[in-house]
Amino acid sequence: MKFKSLYKNNRKMLIIGTAAFIILDAAYIIYLISGLPSLEQLENPNPELATRVYSIDGEVLDQFYVKNRTSITLSQLPPHLVNALIATEDKNFFNHWGVDLPRFIRAMIKNVFTLRLWTGPGASTITQQLARNLYELKGTNESVFGKVTRKMREFITAVQIERNYTKQEIIEMYLSVAFFGRSAYGIASAAQIYFGKDPSELTLSESALLIALLKGPGAYDPFKHLDRALNRRNTVLSQMVKYEVSARI
């Protein structure tokens, strides 16, 4: 009787609370979806590329850019570069559908309990990182709410990317847009800026050093922090040995 009386007295508050919860959920879903790339953007990504000026004999005279970025294909990359990327950033790349669900769940739980975004090893797959970079999902000075919302958008966008592109195409796009520091967007620009050569000419050690920069281009800049950069490069090399990744290209 007491329970029925309590329910009757608080029925109005329960109804109002439930309605408010449903409205807030619906509003958040609308807000979440509003920040996702459109279907056209997914099918026709348009990263900003550098404009090159060539001489009559095919030599590059100069280039103009907002972001120093040049698109790349897998045929222009040494296999050990792709192996280094996968072993370090996403060892299960060929076995997931855009999101490594166990790692994603652990990251989100850690967000809730620490009130900050987890950026530890494996927090985002290569496809999620591509979603963030290609569609500029990450904002500046994000709050915890903003970070969690961005991770959800990355999750959804990564799944959509995997539905529209092959794994090889995803690697090509990722290595064409990733930021390596020193105004280098994409592996082609990074290879020129750090080593003065084309990506196809990169050695295993050079490839590992460039992949090392992805964790933090400023923190691992070899011109400013050589010891730190070499230690991170060695970590990349050890990851390659540990996981024995094959790029399947």
Image: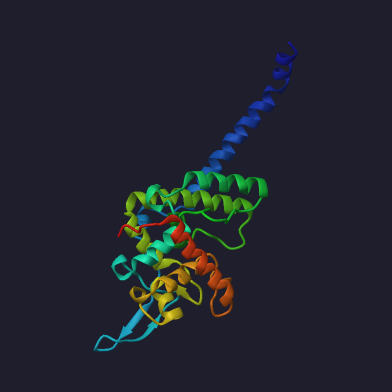
Residue 87, position in %: x, y?
44, 58
Q: Which quadrant: the N terminus?
A: top right
> 243 or 66, which lies in front?
243
Residue 110 left/right relative to 132: right
The residue shown at (57%, 34%) is 22
Q: Nearer the viewer, residue 212 or 128?
A: 212
Please tell me whether residue 103 is drawn above or below residue 57 in the rendered image.
Answer: above
Residue 135 seen: no
In the rendering, at what x and y percent does residue 248 appear?
A: 31, 57
Determine whether, in the image, residue 233 is placed left or right of residue 1: left
Residue 117 shows up from this direction: yes
Q: How many marks overall?
A: 0
Residue 20 lies in quadrant: top right
Q: Nearer the viewer, residue 173 or 219?
A: 219
- Residue ranking furthest to the left: 57
* Spot occupied by residue 129 in the image (x, y as percentages of width and height): 47, 58
Task: Name the residue at 32% across, 58% down.
Answer: 168
Q: Position of residue 63 (x, y in %)?
A: 38, 82
The answer to whether 161 is drawn above or below residue 15 in the figure is below
